[in-house]
Image (tube, grey):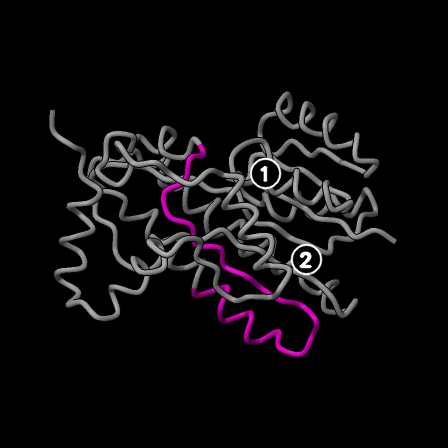
Amino acid sequence: MSKTALITGASSGIGLELAKIFARDKYNLVLVARSADKLNELATELRKENISVDVIVFDLSLPNAARDLFNAVQQKNISIDFLINNAGFGDFGFFIEADWKKTERMISVNIMTLTHLTRLFLPSMVKNGYGRVLNMSSTAAFQPGPLMSVYYATKAYVLHFSEAIGNELKDTGVKVTALCPGATESGFQAASNMEESRLVKGRKLPTSKEVAEFGYKAMMKGKAVAIPGMFNYLLAQSPRFTPRALVVKVARMIQEKTKG
């Protein structure tokens, strides 16, 4: 029987590319996002691979989102072998000026829903003796991030949570991977209002497809932490050898928008 992957945030960026990779390798799919049109268009394309593709249109920032999504999957009598917690977003600017509703939604999607979905789908994976969980973290997880303070903090949570439960699941056949890309050509920067930051402006960024391929291979191998690209790897490791006050100062400088 073919295995099934559930992918949140599947309508664009890395999530969309991961869906294409799973379809290429003949895995069935459950695609989750807020955009019905984009999901249905993607599903039509992927069904050409002769796989089953279910679409669930869902806002993962809503209260009880994880439980409602889990119930929807259960009603379809679908067993999930790969859980891809890809949905998430950021915000750029001073925390004191941030729109609280947006900040609250960010925490809900990046932390609460991701954690709850993992808790809901893990038991069946453990029972079956096989499963993979891919949680979308970031190089942001390795240091504080002035001007994106909450986003960086949520990604640190995802990294530490993933590593911890991965250790707990040793010898169960279930592996957990935290994918930690740096800035990626995915539409994230526009959504987060950070296109003019030094981190992004003028740089040739890796594509969503490249990051998705890297993350997929790392997940299949059961790697705990996956950081694509040597630059990103060095960026993630540098805070270990740098005074924390300097780490925060440099992070602020990189995040700030370019002048002129």
Tell me the residue at 64%/24% (across/down): 36
Magenta range: 160-186
Q: Is residue 80 left or right of residue 186?
A: right
| Rendered residue at 50%/46% (across/down) | 211
Tell me the kind of residue under disc 2. Phe
Q: Is residue 117 above or below residue 100?
A: below
| Disc number for residue 17 | 1
**Relative to 78, is 63 on the left or the right?**
left
* Corner quadrant of residue 132: bottom right
Q: Amino acid at mark 1?
A: Glu
Q: Position of residue 221 (x, y in %)?
A: 62, 64
Give yes or no for residue 164 being in the magenta stretch.
yes
Give the residue displayed 73% in from the left and 63% down from the top.
Answer: 125
Q: Residues within 10 Å of mark 2 (few under 14, many from 20)?
A: some
Residue 42: in magenta span: no
The label on residue 121 is: 2
Specify the quadrant that holds the N terminus. Answer: bottom right
Name the residue nearer the viewer: 153 or 246: 246
Horizontal arrangement in the rendering, residue 193 relative to residue 176 (left or right): left
Furthest toward the right, the residue is 1
Residue at x-position 54% and y-position 49%: 113
Quarter of the image with the C terminus is top left
Crowd around label 1: few <14 · some 14–19 · many ≥20 (10 Å): many
